Image (cartoon, rainbow, N blue to C red):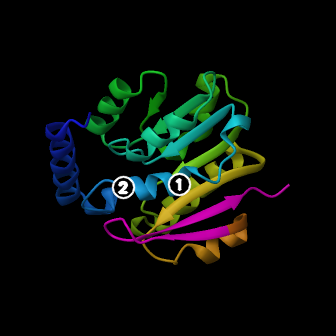
């Protein structure tokens, strides 16, 4: 059964966080179920032993990841906002929560993970300074195993050139049933 009160509180919290720091949040509302499902459907979860989510927010995509995870799969969640990160830790006690996606490899070392099979990202790359964007992408590329999945959603196609230069671009899905509508980039690490 859906807890309507909790859902409304989540949306208001997200909106409040957006109004205080729009460049960090990227959207006025959490990702829709349609977007969350589009983010996870291309990953062969039965083969995944370690994965990460960047910009986990209120856990809209995390919920779909949890539905697909094998029992022993290690999951790293990255969320800069302390309140949201604390809520994720309570809601997903089996996941390890970290603040900074610029330190994916440090988190992996702390958790005893050699390489990640998949990274899912809701980070608003368009809002980030170029240096920060480059640093996160360097961490993503270094953390993924060859052939590993990097799946990111954005509200425009501005990351297409960058991602196709760094990864093999398998497809770009358009998700109209999200506020705002989003593009899901499905990429694989070369090698």
Report the disc number at residue 31.
2
Q: Which residue is mark 1?
A: 39
Residue appearing at x 69%, y 71% in the figure: 164
33 vs 96, left or right, is: left
Give residue 90's position: percent from left, percent from top: 33, 24
Q: Which residues are magenta?
A: 171-191
What residue do we see at 59% from left, 65% from top?
A: 185
Give the quarter of the figure containing the N terminus.
top left
Q: Secondary structure at mark 1?
A: helix
Tell me the quadrant of the picture where the C terminus can be found: bottom right
- Vertical placement of 169 versus 117: above or below? below
Q: Quadrant of residue 87?
A: top left
Q: Quadrant of residue 98?
A: top left
| Residue 59, image x, y percentages | 37, 41
Task: Inspect the magenta stretch and tell me whether residue 155 lies in it.
Answer: no
In the image, residue 105 lies at what x, y percent?
63, 37
- Residue at figure coordinates x 37%, y 27% from the top left: 89
Examine the rendering and report whether any part of residue 120 can be seen. Answer: yes
């Amino acid at each position: 059964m859906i807890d309507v009160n909790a859902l409304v509180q989540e949306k208001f919290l997200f909106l409040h966080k957006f109004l205080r720091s729009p460049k960090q949040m990227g959207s006025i509302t959490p990702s829709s179920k349609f977007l969350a499902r589009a983010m996870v459907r291309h990953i062969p979860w039965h083969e995944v032993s370690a994965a990460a989510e960047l910009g986990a927010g209120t856990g809209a995509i995390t919920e779909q990841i949890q539905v697909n995870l094998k029992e022993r799969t290690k999951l790293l969640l990255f969320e800069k906002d302390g309140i949201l990160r604390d809520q994720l830790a309570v809601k997903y006690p089996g996941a390890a929560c970290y603040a900074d996606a610029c330190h994916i490899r440090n988190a992996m070392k702390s958790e005893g993970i050699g390489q990640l099979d998949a990274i899912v990202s809701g980070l608003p790359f368009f809002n980030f300074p170029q240096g920060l964007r480059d640093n996160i992408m360097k961490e993503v590329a270094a953390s993924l195993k060859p052939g590993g999945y990097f799946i990111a959603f954005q509200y425009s196609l501005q990351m297409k050139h960058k991602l196709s230069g760094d990864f093999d671009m398998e497809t770009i899905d358009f998700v109209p049933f999200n506020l705002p509508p989003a593009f899901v980039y499905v990429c694989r690490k070369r090698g």
